[in-house]
Amino acid sequence: MAIVNRIADFAPEMKIWRQHLHQIPELALDLPKTAAYVADRLREIGVDELHEGIATSGMVAIINGRGNAAGAGPTIGLRADMDALPIPEETGVDYASGHAGNMHACGHDGHTTMLLGAAKYLAETRNFKGRVALIFQPAEEAIGGARIMVEEGIMERFGIGEVFALHNAPGLPVGSFLTAPGALMAAVDTIHIHIQGVGGHGAMPHETRDPVMAACGIAQAIQTIVSRNHHTQEDLVVSVTQIHTGTVDNVIPDTAYINGTVRTFNPEVQKMVMRRMEEIVAGQAASYGVTATLDYEVGYPATINNAEKSRFAVGVAGEIAGPENVEGEAGREMGGEDFSYMLEARPGAYLFLGQGDSAGLHHPKYDFNDEISPIGASFFARLVERAQPLE
């Protein structure tokens, strides 16, 4: 690994940062302790500007390159997400979550640390022209903090011309990189189906309009969207993940609720799914004599890397990890990521950084591997220096 020597020097400090952040996991936009800690580190590092309170608890820090005190020249954006998940932690580490029921189960504490490490190096060396905008974002796991930051105008306000991000990847070798030009991750939509029937005694089903049977029928029928309504070469996932109904064994309930997720890449496929969902829910409800309403919630768009920026990032990753440890033409996957909103606003790329064998993301035993923090920080730093070299 060609970790930048200066970043390797303060790797122990980065470990302290990361493990402190791990102890104070906060959710969605409400990150007062996390944001305060990050802001304090940025002031210590000596960034030129710190703009807080974006998307409630997000912030953008500006570092000017050498000879650009006024911020003249291009600006490259680097993003880290800061929020945690509502999962009780089971790692057993001595720096485990101090917020019961919450934990950093996706490594956002590590992503924030990597960007802080890059900030420390870039503020010391300033071996680049123009500016770098360090974007610390809330609510990746919840309501799309990236969307909110874009809507609040960070790209225009700070003159950001291109934008990049990293995410740790359990199961990939430590320090290896993976990405793809073009589509990398899917659009993420959510379905809510509310069924209203007529309940009654379990021994007298003929006097009811059973929402349980309707829920089963709808759940099975919507699976035919994948198997019968779309071209087999177009990626599509429709998964029913929750069915809630009933209370006891001898009562047919009045209502039922179905929840699930839809993952697509092609907007035309997404439109087809929405149309077929409406038709199936209405048709199945009629066949069971109940009423049903579909709430189709359009979520994060697909994560689409700019091909040119992706190739550039792959080259930088190769400098850090060695070309043999970088997969730049990986297949796309059906997970989702709100960095997609930033990539819609500006060209850029999103990459995965291997953290070795560990529990998977969103697992109660997951923990970020501190060994990869200097690797990620080195990637971010080199990215800036290569994108905006001094003349």
Image (cartoon, helix red, strand yellow):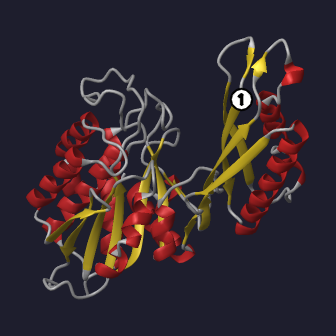
Q: Nearer the viewer, residue 165 or 380?
A: 165
Task: Give the position of the C terminus as an image quadrant.
Answer: bottom left
Image check: 292 left or right of 345? right
Image check: 210 left or right of 316? right
x and y percentages locating residue 364 in the rendered image? 44, 28
Q: Is residue 147 above or below residue 377?
A: below
Quadrant housing residue 233: bottom right
At 34% from the left edge and 50% from the top edge, which residue is drawn? Answer: 111
Quadrant housing residue 240: top right
**Crowding at mark 1 (Cα within 10 Å: few <14, some 14-19, many 20+):** some
Q: Nearer the viewer, residue 83 or 291?
A: 291
At 54% from the left edge and 73% from the top edge, which residue is drawn? Answer: 306
- Count of numbered circles in the view: 1
Q: Amino acid at mark 1?
A: Asp
Q: Is residue 58 above or below residue 193?
A: below
Image check: 110 left or right of 198? left
Q: Nearer the viewer, residue 354 or 261?
A: 261
x and y percentages locating residue 80 in the rendered image? 35, 57
Q: Residue furthest front?
A: 207
Image check: 265 left or right of 282? left
Mark 1, residue position: 254
x and y percentages locating residue 297 in the rendered image? 61, 55
At 70% from the left edge and 50% from the top edge, which residue is drawn? Answer: 294
x and y percentages locating residue 53 in the rendered image? 23, 62
